[in-house]
Image: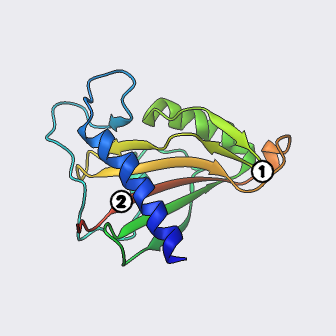
Amino acid sequence: MILKRVILLLCLLLAVIPSVFADNSTKNSPLINLADGNQTEPLLFDPNLTCRDFFLEIDANAPDYFQYHDCQIQDEGQTWPITVIYKVDGKYAKQAHQYLIKTMGMGDLKYLCCYWEQQNPVMIVNPKDNLLYEVSFSSGETLKRDWDETTFYLTITGFRKYDI
């Protein structure tokens, strides 16, 4: 279990670090700044981050079909992540995905084995706290043809600590 977490954390760091140092002025940049106007570099970690409604803080006009589902806090490892999960019923998943493409620059969903998954998480900067968050959209286990009956999840992760 610890080995899986270490491997996952290393993969996460390999995904986060290059996107932070990359030139964010390019059109294909994985880092999306949701704020209007100029802003300083995003903060990568906030020791005071708590379970809160990240999605509504990021976008107060978010559609109602994003329903708060869970908040997971991890007090170990190098980053101490907080992950907030929103549930979307399958009948609203297409609209939700289109909304996320438009507002956060999400990519297409791919069907892998038994679930729908976004291939690359999106890194966004929340204009309210200037923090960097990782955002992904995926489904629960399903058959490819059962889109409308499948539950989808929007996952937003922030980090509270940085230890090397």
The residue positioned 52% from the left and 48% from the top of the image is 136
Name the mark on residue 114.
Answer: 1
Answer above or below: position of 11 versus 40: below
Quadrant that contains the N terminus: bottom right
Dividing the picture into quarters, in which one does residue 29 lie? Answer: top left
Any part of residue 164 in sight: yes
Q: Which residue is mark 2?
A: 158
Q: Nearer the viewer, residue 111 or 37?
A: 111
Local SS, label 2: strand
Decide which of tag 2 and tag 1 comes sooner along the chain.
1
- Few, some or many C-alpha atoms within 10 Å of disc 2 (few <14, some 14-19, many ≥20)? many
Measuring from the top left, give residue 61's x and y in whole percent: 44, 43
The residue positioned 38% from the left and 66% from the top of the image is 81
Q: Nearer the viewer, residue 96 or 109?
A: 109
Residue 36 shown left or right of residue 3 in the figure:
left
Measuring from the top left, give residue 135's x and y in whole percent: 46, 48
Which marked residue is nearer to the observer: mark 2 or mark 1?
1
Measuring from the top left, give residue 134's x and y in whole percent: 41, 50
Name the mark on residue 81.
Answer: none
Quadrant that contains the C terminus: bottom left
Amino acid type, label 1: Cys
- Few, some or many C-alpha atoms within 10 Å of disc 1 (few <14, some 14-19, many ≥20)? few
- Taking the view exactly as shown, the residue that stands out farthest to the top is 27
Q: In whole angstroms, how far apart are the C-alphas of marks 2 and 1?
A: 27 Å
Measuring from the top left, give residue 126's x and y in whole percent: 30, 47
